[in-house]
């Protein structure tokens, strides 16, 4: 083995420029593949981070406008949800519905504390709203049953809203904030959503319902579901719920616009599919780039085999077997590919680290939307291991065809040549 390595090293030294040019193609291929994987991870981590605050067993329902005529009604009729629909969710759909909550809202209100003010929407919710929505309560508490029963004027707001209204930086808990024409006591804060500017404040459902004369009409229903593990099961549940509501509100069960449904499980599945497609696409692009370098190595090895035809003839005349010739040529190919491949891989990892330090974890703020983008655009050890395997396999493939050609050389013809 030592003699073989010395011979390979001698061959590389005799053809320095050719070896460097060949290795550069391999190094650039691995370099680009690592960078593409880092960029892919940055995008995928962004998708995962900005969907991480959502529970994946929640379905929300809103009223819409009919798009199909039904029962003597023309299309375009508005469907307004009411408290009957919440009872439908908890009583008729209880096989898959763990709990359901309704909310009413009053927008266009001004919240103020002294000279500080902001436009807000007051949401009337049930006590289980926070659990179903997966809200992260950082201070105080959420609306409770006593607040509901006594129709208390208490409110919960986001941390960002509290900073905007209470400029003295003291805790806003148990302090009053004026919303519209009334005063509400702040009972809790929740972590602000990093993706959207949230101007919602939450009060007891009964309080908002009474003060703003909402009657039995509700804005939306939020359901926490169970045993809906597949896309098909979620689609069947949505159709069953839509069909049940069609009897209550007299619309066509196949009318998709009569009510709007948002399913977090479906969204999560779509995000996962998009992430997998993105990762696969970047792997394919990286491999195609690497293949161009491998083809270059293979071509150079063919030239090397042609130049050493006389040498291979002498070796075979002295008793060398075809597998010895094949092994030597393939080993030379693997060494060239591995050395320059690792150089390219290290350069790619270094570039990803620079990319992470300069443009990674950037906060995009366009007013109503705040989103952290390009999160951790680096590669992990698993990617480096896969890249190592690819380098070795690529080197072996690059040397296989030239090695097979060298093994077929007949000693007499080689010596005559």
Image (spheres, rainbow, N blue to C red):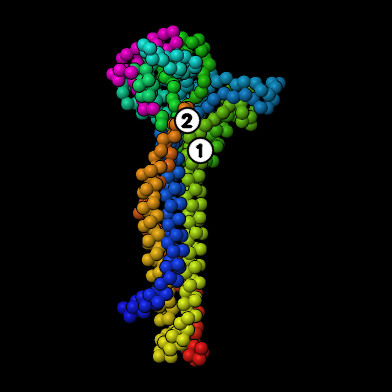
Q: Point out residue 45 in the picture as x, y percentages from the top left corner.
A: 42, 43
The residue at which mark 1 appears reads as 266
Q: 281 and 368: which one is in front? A: 368
Q: Give the quarter of the image for residue 51.
A: top left
User: Residue at horizontal 69%, vertical 21%?
Assistant: 73
The residue at which mark 2 appears reads as 366
Assess whether residue 75 is covered by the magenta stretch.
Answer: no
Query: Counting other residues with Cα less than 10 Å from the Cα at mark 2, is it few (<14), some (14-19), or many (20 or more)?
Result: few
Assess whether residue 189 is covered by the magenta stretch.
Answer: yes
Q: Which residues are magenta?
A: 167-192
Q: Which residue is outermost to the left?
A: 170
Callout count: 2
Where's the N terminus, which quadrant?
bottom left
User: Residue at horizontal 51%, vertical 63%?
Assistant: 292
User: Residue at horizontal 47%, vertical 79%?
Assistant: 305
Q: 247 and 393: which one is in front? A: 393
């Amino acid at each position: 083995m030592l003699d073989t390595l010395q011979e390979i090293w001698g061959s590389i030294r005799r053809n320095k420029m050719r070896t460097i040019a060949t290795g550069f193609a391999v190094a650039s291929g691995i370099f680009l593949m690592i960078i593409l994987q880092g960029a892919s991870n940055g995008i995928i981590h962004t998708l995962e981070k900005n969907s991480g605050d959502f529970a994946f067993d929640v379905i929300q329902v809103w009223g819409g406008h009919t798009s199909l005529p039904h029962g003597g009604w023309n299309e375009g009729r508005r469907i307004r949800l009411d408290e009957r629909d919440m009872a439908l969710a908890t009583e008729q759909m209880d096989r898959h519905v763990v709990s359901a909550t309704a909310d009413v809202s009053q927008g266009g209100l001004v919240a103020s504390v002294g000279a500080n003010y902001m436009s807000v929407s007051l949401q009337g919710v049930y006590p289980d709203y926070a659990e179903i929505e997966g809200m992260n309560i950082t201070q105080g508490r959420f609306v409770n049953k006593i607040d509901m029963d006594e129709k208390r004027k208490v409110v919960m707001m986001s941390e960002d809203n509290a900073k905007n209204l209470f400029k003295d930086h003291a805790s806003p808990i148990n302090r009053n904030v004026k919303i519209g024409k009334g005063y509400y006591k702040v009972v809790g804060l929740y972590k602000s959503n990093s993706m959207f500017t949230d101007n919602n404040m939450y009060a007891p459902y009964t309080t908002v319902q009474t003060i703003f004369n909402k009657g039995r009409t509700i804005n939306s229903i939020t359901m926490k579901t169970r045993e809906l593990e597949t896309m098909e099961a979620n689609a069947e549940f949505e159709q069953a719920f839509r069909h049940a509501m069609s009897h209550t509100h007299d619309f066509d069960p196949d009318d998709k616009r009569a009510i709007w449904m948002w399913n977090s499980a479906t969204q999560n599945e779509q995000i996962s599919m998009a992430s997998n497609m993105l990762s696969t696409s970047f792997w394919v692009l990286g491999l195609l780039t690497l293949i161009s370098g491998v083809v270059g190595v293979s071509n150079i090895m063919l030239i090397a085999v042609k130049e050493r035809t006389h040498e291979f003839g002498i070796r075979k005349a002295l008793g060398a077997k075809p597998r010895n010739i094949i092994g030597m040529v393939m080993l030379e190919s693997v060494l060239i590919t591995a050395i320059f491949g690792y150089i390219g891989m290290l350069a790619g990892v270094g570039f990803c680290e620079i990319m992470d330090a300069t443009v990674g974890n950037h906060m995009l703020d366009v007013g109503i939307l705040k989103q952290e983008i390009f999160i951790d655009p680096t590669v992990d050890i698993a990617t480096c291991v896969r890249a190592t395997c690819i380098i070795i396999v690529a080197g072996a493939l690059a040397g296989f065809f030239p090695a097979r050609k060298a093994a077929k050389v007949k000693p007499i013809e080689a010596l005559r040549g």
